């Protein structure tokens, strides 16, 4: 639902589906959309559809606080460097969230130690906090009250990642604005940009709440 709020996002999904259909005989459920999304020809096409207008990219946002304006005296060389940096920032801002398949639960039991059964009234979660490991690749396991050691569920992973490696603006509990009754009211006001910004902050691209 969130990816189909406004037309550009809908076009991206339709584009991915069409390319999948033309490039393979497999059904939609058997094809990973991320493999199509990262293709250079697809990225080039999406860039052309989006356009590159710096005045629109860096326009004043009504839901953002105003930063103090800074004036600088620059040489021609320094001005060119600043312009190049602005173009790089603009390209980064235009990068679309990846189109991914919905993440599926894949809990694996690693061990069951009956001697630990009843040791605690609460389950314990553990996360690898070693340096240099991408956050989505970190091992997260849980020890249940019955002594079972298993890999974490999707919800447990999401919470542990946010606790140990917090993302600014993301909450542990899904904001009520994404519940149907509240979401419909926001849509009626036409605050599509606000919803999409908030969704990209709150959810991972393969989260079921983001994809629905």
Image (cartoon, rainbow, N blue to C red):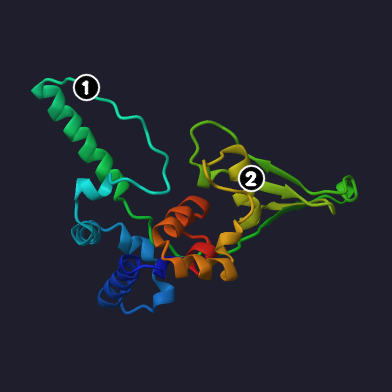
In the depicted structure, whether residue 155 falls above or below residue 189:
above
* 141 relative position to 181: left or right: right
Residue 25 seen in this snapshot: yes
Query: Earlier along the polypeptide chain: callout 1 or callout 2?
Result: 1
Q: Residue at x 52, y 42 (%)?
A: 167
* Mark 2 neighbour class, 10 Å CA radius: few under 14, some 14 to 19, many 20 or more: some
In this view, the residue farthest toward the left is 76
In the depicted structure, whether residue 126 falls above or below residue 191:
above
Q: Nearer the viewer, residue 81 or 147?
A: 81
Task: Assess whether mark 2 and mark 1 are in contact (beta carbons under 8 angstroms).
Answer: no
In the depicted structure, whether residue 177 falls above or below residue 13:
above
* 178 relative position to 52: left or right: right
Q: Nearer the viewer, residue 94 or 181?
A: 181
Q: Residue at x 59, y 44 (%)?
A: 161
Marking on residue 160 = 2
Which numbered mark, 1 or 2, is in the foreground of this view? 1
* 199 relative position to 145: left or right: left
User: Cα distance, mark 1 to mark 2?
Assistant: 43 Å
Q: Residue at x 14, y 27 (%)?
A: 79
Where residue 10 sits, quadrant-wise, is: bottom left
Image x and y of residue 115, in percent: 89, 47
Residue where numbered disc 1 is placed: 72
Residue 103 seen in this snapshot: no
Image x and y of residue 179, in percent: 59, 66
Q: Residue at x 30, y 30 (%)?
A: 69
* Mark 1 neighbour class, 10 Å CA radius: few under 14, some 14 to 19, many 20 or more: few
Where residue 58 sits, quadrant-wise, is: top left
Q: For the residue labelled by badge 2, is the local secondary structure a helix, a strand or a loop?
A: helix
Image x and y of residue 140, in percent: 63, 46
Q: For the residue labelled by badge 1, is the local secondary structure a helix, a strand or a loop?
A: loop
């Amino acid at each position: 639902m969130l990816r189909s709020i406004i037309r550009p996002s809908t076009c991206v999904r339709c584009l991915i589906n069409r390319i999948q259909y033309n490039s393979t005989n497999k059904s939609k459920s058997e094809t990973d959309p991320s493999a199509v999304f990262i293709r250079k020809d697809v990225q080039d096409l999406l860039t052309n559809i989006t356009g590159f207008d710096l005045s629109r990219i860096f326009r004043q946002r009504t839901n953002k606080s105003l930063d103090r304006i800074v004036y600088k005296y620059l040489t021609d060389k320094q001005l060119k460097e600043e312009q190049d940096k602005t173009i790089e920032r603009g390209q980064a801002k235009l990068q679309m969230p990846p189109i991914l398949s919905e993440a599926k639960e894949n809990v694996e039991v690693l061990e069951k130690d009956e001697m630990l059964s009843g040791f605690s009234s609460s389950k314990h979660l553990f996360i690898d906090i070693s340096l240099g490991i991408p956050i989505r690749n970190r091992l997260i396991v849980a020890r249940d009250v019955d002594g079972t050691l298993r890999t974490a569920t999707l919800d447990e992973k999401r919470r542990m990642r946010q606790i140990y490696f917090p993302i600014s603006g993301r909450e542990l509990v899904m904001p009520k604005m994404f519940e149907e009754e509240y979401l419909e009211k926001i849509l009626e006001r036409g605050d599509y940009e606000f919803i999409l910004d908030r969704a990209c902050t709150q959810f991972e691209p393969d989260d079921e709440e983001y994809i629905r």
